[in-house]
Image (cartoon, rainbow, N blue to C red):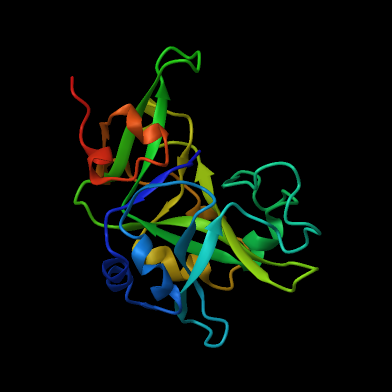
């Protein structure tokens, strides 16, 4: 799964790094970045196809945790899903409509995962995962737009697509987020209804990971030292 990310870049740096996309209205999030311990329920800049100009892309604001457009009420008593499994995304009723027509890119600098050391769930070692060269990258996401039937207010939300792990991630977990190569960005957010072949493990040789301290467990700890390597 993927339930925590980090963005070391400022919002301006992130927009420049994905300059093929129009900045849109994400400037309102400027004070929220860098974000060193990004959890679900927060609002992030994501990239979608510009509906006004087909073939173009734009940044929009979206809340992490998918609320499908057909849902009658915002609250269902359960947290909205933050991940969608690649193996069932095209058929799962929660995700299939968004997958077919409303996919997005989620730009980040890295993400966190926990290794269940003894398989009991009681002793988990957190890791930070990023690109070896330190560059930002994009996760595959799906996005939807829900309208509050009482107020008419619109809520844009997203979930991150996951797949089986590559050789690096398999040493600590049985899932990983789908990381897209830049050459595939436009294909992912484009009109293709089922770009299934893009949902695959990213090459492990381009990635790195390191053990970090356990303070990352609380989203309240949102400081740069979250990323410091753990002491032996």
* Relative depth, front residue between 164 and 16: 16
**Percent from the top left, x then y, of residue 40?**
51, 48
For residue 53, side relative to residue 71 (left or right): left
**Percent from the top left, x then y, of residue 56?**
46, 81
For residue 85, side relative to residue 91 (left or right): left
* Relative depth, front residue between 130 and 212: 212
For residue 23, side relative to residue 72 (left or right): left
* Total tally of numbered discs in the picture: 0
Going 62% across and 54% down the picture, which residue do you hit? 66
The quadrant of the rendering that contains the C terminus is top left
Going 36% across and 77% down the picture, which residue do you hit? 20
Q: Residue furthest bottom?
A: 53
**Percent from the top left, x then y, of residue 192?**
59, 69
**Percent from the top left, x then y, of residue 75?**
73, 51
Q: Is residue 35 above or below residue 166?
A: below
Going 43% across and 12% down the picture, which residue do you hit? 118
Asked if one can make out residue 167 in the rendered structure from this viewpoint, the answer is no
Asked if one can make out residue 173 in the rendered structure from this viewpoint, the answer is yes
Q: Is residue 86 above or below residue 43?
A: above
For residue 168, side relative to residue 96 (left or right): left
Going 65% across and 48% down the picture, which residue do you hit? 80
């Amino acid at each position: 799964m993927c339930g925590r990310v980090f963005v070391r870049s400022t919002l301006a740096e992130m927009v420049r790094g994905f300059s093929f996309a129009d900045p849109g209205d994400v400037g309102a999030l400027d004070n929220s970045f860098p974000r060193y311990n990004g959890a679900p329920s927060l609002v992030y800049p994501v990239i979608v196809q510009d509906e006004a100009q087909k073939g173009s892309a734009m940044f929009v604001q979206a809340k992490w945790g998918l609320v499908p457009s057909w849902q009658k009420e915002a609250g269902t008593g359960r947290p909205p899903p933050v991940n969608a499994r690649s193996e069932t995304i095209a058929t799962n009723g929660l995700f299939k409509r968004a997958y077919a027509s409303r996919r997005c890119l989620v730009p980040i600098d890295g993400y966190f995962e926990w290794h269940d050391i003894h398989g009991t769930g009681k002793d988990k070692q957190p890791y930070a995962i990023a690109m070896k060269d330190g560059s930002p990258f994009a996760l595959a996401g799906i996005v939807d737009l829900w309208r509050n039937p009482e107020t008419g207010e619109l809520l844009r939300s997203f979930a991150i697509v996951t797949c089986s792990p590559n050789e690096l991630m398999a040493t600590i977990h049985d899932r990983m987020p789908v990381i897209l190569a830049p050459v595939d960005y436009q294909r992912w957010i484009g009109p293709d209804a089922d770009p299934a072949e893009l949902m695959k493990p990213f090459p492990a040789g381009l990635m790195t990971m390191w053990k970090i301290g356990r303070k990352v467990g609380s989203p309240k700890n949102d400081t740069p030292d979250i990323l410091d390597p753990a002491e032996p």
